Amino acid sequence: MPETLIVICPHCASPNRVAAARLGDRGNCGKCKQALFEGHPVELNAANFDAHTGRSDLPVVVDFWAPWCGPCRGMAPAFEQAALDLEPNIRLAKLNTENEPELAARFAIRSIPTLAIFQGGREVARQSGAMDAGSLTRWIRSHV
């Protein structure tokens, strides 16, 4: 692991340099002064998606979901729990495919929920279907 990591602020999408040894301190953004980690998934949209998935040194797990999707709503508490368990080493994020159909098309999302793990700007793993918190955490850890 490098000595310094780039962590994208979940509030303003600004990059922040954080010493790897201090990642657990859950610091604040240098620009907007808000917490870099809050223990819940970050809401992604067209404006901040590429910053989080492409510029962050942290692996980012994206839940492609929609509000009308029953399995998506059913998995939401498990995804929330996984964010609490995996931060600050892994960022979890949600992308509403109803609000961002272009991003869903860009990543060929054909069913929801679909989870994708991004590292270094590349998708490294994908899984469709709802999972419980334990299965979700194990799947994420096995791919990062």
Image (spheres, rainbow, N blue to C red):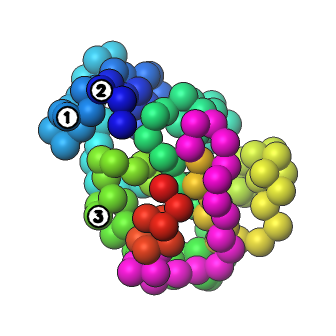
Q: Report how many numbered discs are placed on residues in the image.
A: 3
Q: Earlier in the sequence, mark 3 or mark 1?
A: 1
Amino acid type at mark 2: Glu
Q: Quadrant of residue 129?
A: bottom right
Residue at (53% x, 61% y) in the render: 143
- Checking the image for residue 121, the label placed there is none
Q: Position of residue 58 (x, y in %)?
A: 44, 41
Residue at (43% x, 74% y) in the render: 138
Q: Quadrant of the N terminus?
A: top left
Secondary element under disc 1, as helix, strand or loop, is helix
Q: Which residues are magenta?
A: 119-136
Q: Quadrant of residue 16?
A: top left
Marks 3 and 1 sit apart, C-alpha to C-alpha, by 18 Å
Residue identifier under label 2:
3
Residue at (34% x, 69% y) in the render: 81
Taking depth in this image into account, of 44 and 24 the one nearest to the observer is 24
Q: Does residue 65 appear anywhere in the picture?
A: no
Quick check: marks 1 and 2 in contact, CB under 8 Å?
yes
Secondary element under disc 3, as helix, strand or loop, is helix
- Checking the image for residue 85, the label placed there is 3
Q: Earlier in the sequence, mark 3 or mark 2?
A: 2
Residue identifier under label 1:
21
Amino acid type at mark 1: Ala
Q: Position of residue 46 (x, y in %)?
A: 67, 36
Amino acid type at mark 3: Asp
Q: Is residue 7 left or right of residue 96?
A: left
Marks 3 and 2 sit apart, C-alpha to C-alpha, by 23 Å
Marks 1 and 2 sit apart, C-alpha to C-alpha, by 7 Å
